[in-house]
Amino acid sequence: MGMDRRRPPEAHLPLRPVEFQVLLSLASGDRHGYGILQDAGERGERIDVGTLYRALARMAERGWIAPAGGDADDERRNNYALTDYGLGIARAEAARLAGLMRAARRGGLLPETAT
Amino acid sequence: MKGGGGSRNATAGNETRLSRRWFRLLLRLYPAEFRDEMGDALVDTYVARARAARERGGLALAGVWSRALVDSLKNGLGERVSPAVAWRRSSGWGRDAQLVFRRLRRAPVFSLAILGTLTVGLGAFTVVYTLVHQVLIAPLPYEEPDDLYYVWRDYRAFFDLDRGWMAGTDVVELARAGGVIEDAVALRSGGFTLTGDTDERPTEIDVMLTTPNLFGVLGVEPSLGRGFAPDEGGEGAGDVIVLTRPLWNQLGGEEEILGRELRLDGYPFTVIGVLPEGFDFVRHSSLGAPSGAEAYIPFDYDLSTTSPGSGAFAGLIRVRDGTPGPAVEAAVAAVGRVVDERDFQDRGLEFYPVALKPDMVAGVEPALLVVGLAGVFLLLVLLVNLASLLLVRAVERENELAVSRALGANRMALMRATMLEGAVLGMAGGAAGAVAAIWATSAFVSLAPPDLPRLGQIAVDWRIGLTVAAVGLLLGLLAAALPAVWASRARLSRLLGASAVRGGGGHGRARRGMVVLQVALSLILLSAGGLVVRSFAELLRSRPGFDTEGILTLRVPIADAQSAEESEPRHEAIQRELARIPGVTAVGAVSGLPLAGGSDQTTIAVPGAPGNTGVQETDHPLVDYIQVRPGYVEAVGMRVLEGRTFAPQPPEGRREALVDDQVALQFFPGRSALGARIVVNGDSLEVIGVVGHARLYDVHEDGRPQVYLRNGGPTGYTSLSYAIRSTRDPESLAPEVRAAVAAVDPRLPVSDVRTMEDIVSASLSQQRVSAVLIAGFSLGALLLAAMGVFGVVAGSVTRRRHELALRLALGADHGRVLRHVLREGAVLIVLGLLLGAPGVYLGGRVIRSVLVGVSPWDPVTLGGVAVGLGAIALLACWLPARRVTGIEPSRLLREA
């Protein structure tokens, strides 16, 4: 994970959909796996449980997120928190998506709205 | 939806269980590493999702189930093909190990306490194990060492000697016997003055004289050059010498040494071979310690021409491979009967064989076994201590364990974690112990009795290191087994139920049991330690019949003299020179110093003495006869009970003798022995004095009766040991002493310069080592037991603080609560002492053989040990129990 953290957040873009969902969900507070699924569900996104946990394992290994809540060696490591590095990636991805959004508007795919 | 609420809840419960089982099954699709890391959370999430779906109806639940199948197929197989994470911690064990290390790092005091305990305990165990293994168990470095036997003469049919030297003719007879006896070797050893072919400083070396077949019989080949040829022994043939590795190194260590000439006592010998590194042979003695040698030369006379009456040789035989002991005994006894008939007129001389190894270790075996047993006991105490410490850990982690269990961590995983903790600690402790033992063993070797068999081989090697690490591992696993089982049974319900009033559960009983066991084991070990130390104190107090302080001794061989008559003038001159050294108050010389030299034996007769009984054997007792120069009795501080000692100049035409109190008592009970005539070696001598017995063999017991003669006659010695009494520190005399001898004759070597204190101390080194080791072990056990008691009482006070606070609040004063807690500890201690008592009895039987001057059931020692142990254990109770006085009921009960 040390290697990863030395890379700028932009190097990881674009993110997989599930990764962005996780980062998005954790940006507003620590969540356990089921909480992330529920958040995503509220956003109208459906994530498979296996896909989620594989992503969690991968992201934790890369240092984007970290097991949180109680002891680090507690057997129930369900809670995850966003790391600073993870937050940077989430922001970079959001900026990237915002840029795409602007392009979509300019291209007439989305209605123009006042900012 | 259907039925009442109760049954609905039950159905939901059933469905949840079913769901869980299904998801667990699907989890199998994932690789094990992923399962271990994420599986529980994944299943929990599925279950949560299923529960939510159920609210929406059965169809939704079925949807979740089937979607989980598709998901698991996709991601489970996907994970197998491209893992989300390179799972470095590849297995459950690996992950657990990481957890264990992290946990141990976070509890440094606990970890260091255990590691320290294990290091010391296992280190001590390693020293003892190395000792016992190398001395008692490891095979001797000869070919088929079990087929080698020493043969001794048993004279008991006609006088009191059950282990006498062989005559040269006996060995010839053994070699000729055939049958199961394949070959026989005769051995003698002696000190020789070695000079090189140039004019080097003469040195005194120990040389083994042997028949030429020695190396063949042992199955050892010189690593350089060759051994003796069969025709190199006997009349006029013996002018070749084989060197041991150390002597060869001392002489320069060059291969060119082959063919070089060395001079022993002035006679030339040609070097024909050098023995391999590690060749470590000793000639066993009829009495006293075995002796090694730095070089080997063949006899220069024919053994068959030696006198059959005088025993002077050690006889070593090799028997046909695998011959059982009784057959060897029979064959040797048969040879003995031939000799008895031919040379002893059937008076009943017998021969008997003793296997090499038992013969070698017989002297040290009892002490080593006792020390070894003590080591095993220490391990037991260590085991119990480790187990109770791990249990404390497990109890402290009660919360964590119970929650883990409640959240579905499986029982095996919890057990595995605790076992791993024990294993890691045990193995680390074992390794540290082995490292500590490498140092401790070399320290021990320098402290050990120089006559301990195979002292040179005693070192910790990698096999012993591995063994000890394995013992540590086993110890850790055993110690962890109980806490592991306990941990795996930790229940959330119990934890919640016990949050107010805890303690008294299963682990409490287990820990109290361990304290009882620890106290019992410590009592046994401490009793043994106490007895051995008492015995050693008795040894130090014993009065050997001579002064041990203020005396310097040394040996001066006069190698070029053919007889004592020839050497005496120079000894006379040396004694005069020595007496001139400032501060010297008395000087004398002797054929063999007490506790170091041994002596010759002969039978004596005192014709006409009132103590004669008419029984041939009692009237001709076997005595040690010791040859001295005038001044010796005074120099070593022997007591003169009657009469006088030898005058500086021998009287004309009279032969004089001194007898010891034993001889005087036997032949002249209640009257004076002065003026009586005794017959020694066929000479009639006048008794001019009676002296106190000066112990020749053991510092703690008298040996045979003694007769002292003036050195000189045909049986006199050319090589004498000097005793120099002075008002100065004896060590400081050494340079002047060497100069004095050199002033008489610069070619004379001076050897064995040491103080009388050193001689006594060396003779006690085996007992000292046993005493130090066992005392160390028992103090270790005491410390461990105290720690155990302390831990249990401290834990009990912590757990019961609410209960104790309640008692205080209800009106009990602190003193009363303190007594209450102390009583709990005291009961355990008393139980432990009672449980240990039978062990003390059995232990007494085992160590009886190594005790001197103290009974194995000495009430003072045992009582003292029990009281001391009880007191220290009580102190270990009192320290943590004092904490109850710090309990403030109001605050504590509010917390609760």
Image: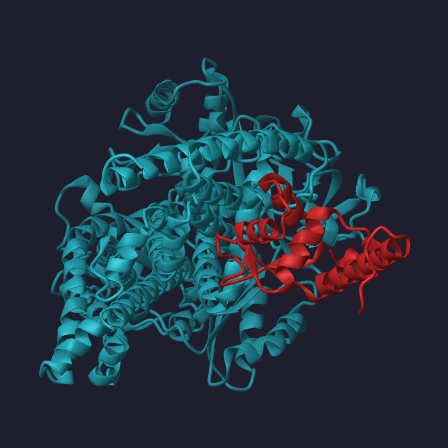
Q: Which chain is cyan?
A: B
Q: Relative to B236, is B178 on the left or the right? A: left
In the displayed orientation, state which residue is furthest to the left: B811
Q: Considering depth in this image, is B254 or A11 the residue closer to the camera? A: A11
Q: Considering depth in this image, is B756 or B807 the residue closer to the camera? A: B807
Q: Considering depth in this image, is B866 or B823 the residue closer to the camera? A: B823
Q: Position of residue A38 (x, y in %)?
A: 55, 51
Q: Position of residue B323 (x, y in %)?
A: 43, 18
Q: Relative to B392, is B828 on the left or the right? A: left
Residue B484 in view, yes or no: yes
Q: Considering depth in this image, is B231 or B10 the residue closer to the camera? A: B10
Q: Quadrant of the C terminus of chain B?
A: bottom left
Residue drawn at x 50%, y 67% is B108
* Figure quadrant of residue B165: top left
Up-down: is B450 above or below B354? below
Q: Quadrant of the N terminus of chain B?
A: top left
Q: Relative to B826, is B336 on the left or the right? A: right
Which color has been applied to chain A in this rendered view? red
Q: Relative to B746, is B823 on the left or the right? A: left
Q: Position of residue B656 (x, y in %)?
A: 35, 62
Q: Position of residue B278 (x, y in %)?
A: 63, 42
Give the total of numbered labels: 0
* Figure quadrant of residue B772: bottom left
Up-down: is B314 above or below B785? above
In the displayed orientation, state which residue is furthest to the right: A107
The colour scheme used here is by chain
Residue B543 in view, yes or no: no
